[in-house]
Amino acid sequence: MNIDAMHTALLILILMLAGYIIYLHVQLVRKNILIESIIRKVSGIEKELSGGEIKKFLNELHNFNARSFLLNDKLFEENTIDFIFSSMTESSTYIHYTIDENVARKIMGEGFMFVESFHKTALAVSNDKLDLMIKHNSKKYYGDYIIVICIANEIVKAFTSELERSGITDYSFENLLTENPPYKNENSDSVFLLSSHFIKGFLNYRTGEIVQNPSFNPNYSSSGFSNNISRLKAALSTK
């Protein structure tokens, strides 16, 4: 092959590579525009997103599929989002995912069971649709049913203050909101059962179905809660 032919072949290769780079760039721009439009649609955000904000969002949603999210997910329809957000001004709100409707109904009727820390399986949510979307996208594969838990801010404040006054640092207020003392499981971990009165209900994020708990009372208080404080005080004094 002579030198002119080699130069021609090299030039064609460079042009092909340049064309491919331009193609990839166009696809990336189209993807960013799509993501940004989805964010505005779902979260109500009106501002322009910077490149850094879009990159951060993409990193947090590395498994995000826009088409399946919009077609198969009812979480951000008006009635379902209102069910989650409606108590937020006066309550701390959490969500928990489960795969079985019977389990969801059992939690609603009997209470929310957790081992050691409430926050291992319950996600705190704020009145922010984008924050909820990110958390939902990372947890939705744990099940179609979302348990909604609401605890009145006054209850949170009262029992958090009681723990602080008592010098109890190994527990948080959720550990106190149980009707019965915790018990040890086979791994010697403490198992707690949050009162069912704090369960607002549950929803199916694929169908949009909502089931409300008739016994829901975010301001619920019980003598059992105070007994838990007394029990922890006694245990602390023996150390």
Image (cartoon, helix red, strand yellow):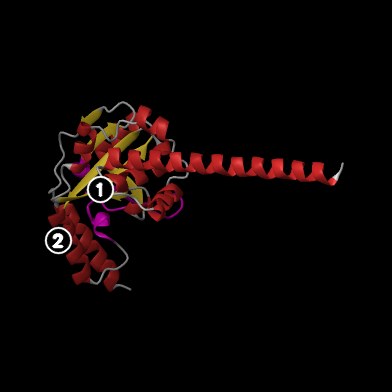
In the rendered image, which quarter is residue 80 located in? top left
- Mark with earlier residue (1, 2): 1
Circle 1 residues within 10 Å: few <14, some 14–19, many ≥20:
few
Q: Is residue 157 left or right of residue 123?
A: left
Q: Residue at x 25, y 38 (%)?
A: 110
Q: Which image quarter holds the C terminus?
A: bottom left
Q: Check disc 2: other Cα within 10 Å, few if <14, some if 14-19, many if 20+.
A: few
Q: Which quarter of the figure has residue 161?
A: bottom left
Q: Nearer the viewer, residue 123 or 158?
A: 123
Residue closest to the eye, 107 or 224: 107
The nearer-to-camera label among 1 and 2 is 1
Q: Which residues are magenta?
A: 172-199
Task: Say which amino acid is labelled 2.
Answer: Ala
Q: Residue at x 36, y 46 (%)?
A: 134
Q: Secondary structure at mark 1?
A: loop
Q: Residue 31 location in percent, x, y?
A: 44, 40
Gap in Å between the C-alphas at discs 1 and 2? 26 Å
On the image, numbered disc 2 is attached to which residue? 158
Looking at this view, is 184 or 165 the one in front? Answer: 165
Name the residue beneath numbered marker 1.
128
> Residue 50 location in percent, x, y?
36, 53
Look at the picture and state if 12 lies above or below 234: above
Horizontal side of residue 164 vs 186, given as left or right: left
Quarter of the rendering occupied by the N terminus: top right
Q: Residue at left 32%, top 48%? A: 122
Q: Is residue 120 magenta?
A: no
